[in-house]
Image (cartoon, rainbow, N blue to C red):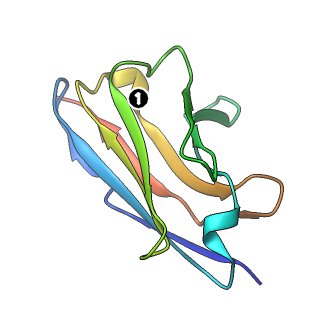
């Protein structure tokens, strides 16, 4: 089945940056939309960014202008560049092929 493996999470101070990566396998990657979700403690999982097979992107209002999603079809990777991080960005970040597969998640903690 489809395998998604995230990396790049960690502890960062407010205002800092992180870049998340997700490696996909066992999928014809270039044909699929890909997305990043996050789940904060005590909250429901929410979608933060999506990139279509045609490279169209869409962001939640809470991250627009600060986060950038991108993909490399040759490497079967997606990325989430996160800038000007806030404490509200804390949570587990998941890579997803919407409706098909989830990664195991990577923790992002924004704290001074």
**Residue at horizontal 54%, vertical 45%?**
55
Q: How many marks?
A: 1
Front-lying residue, 16 or 52: 52
Can you say whether 48 is above or below 107 in the image? Answer: above
Tell me residue 93's x, y (percent).
Answer: 50, 48
Can you say whether 86 is above or below 44 in the image? Answer: above
Q: Which residue is mark 1?
A: 89
Please give left or right for residue 75 compared with residue 105 in the image. left
Position of the N terminus, as image quadrant, is: bottom right
Residue at the right extreme of this rendering: 99
Front-lying residue, 89 or 68: 68
Front-lying residue, 12 or 71: 71
Tell me residue 70's x, y (percent).
Answer: 42, 49
- Please tell me whether mark 1 sits on a helix, a strand or a loop: helix
Residue at the front extreme of this rendering: 54
Rendered image quadrant of residue 20: bottom left
- How crowded pointer 1 is (Cα within 10 Å; few <14, some 14-19, many 20+) is rated as many
Can you say whether 107 is above or below 103 in the image? Answer: above
Position of the C terminus, as image quadrant, is: top left
Residue at the top extreme of this rendering: 61
Front-lying residue, 12 or 103: 103
Rendered image quadrant of residue 111: top left
Please give left or right for residue 24 compared with residue 85 in the image. right
Please give left or right for residue 111 compared with residue 6 in the image. left
**Residue at horizontal 42%, vertical 76%?**
75
Tell me residue 59's x, y (percent).
Answer: 54, 26
Rendered image quadrant of residue 65: top left
Can you say whether 51 is above or below 47 in the image? Answer: below
């Amino acid at each position: 089945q489809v395998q998604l493996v995230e990396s790049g999470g960690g502890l960062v101070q407010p205002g800092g940056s992180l870049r998340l990566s997700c490696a996909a396998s066992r999928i014809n990657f270039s044909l699929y939309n890909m997305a990043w979700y996050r789940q904060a403690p005590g909250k429901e999982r929410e979608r933060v960014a999506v990139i279509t097979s045609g490279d169209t992107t869409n962001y939640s209002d809470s991250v627009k202008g600060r986060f950038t999603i991108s993909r490399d079809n040759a490497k079967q990777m997606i990325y989430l560049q996160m800038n000007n991080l806030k404490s509200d960005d804390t949570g587990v970040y998941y890579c997803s092929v919407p409706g098909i597969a989830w990664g195991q998640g990577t923790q992002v903690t924004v704290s001074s």
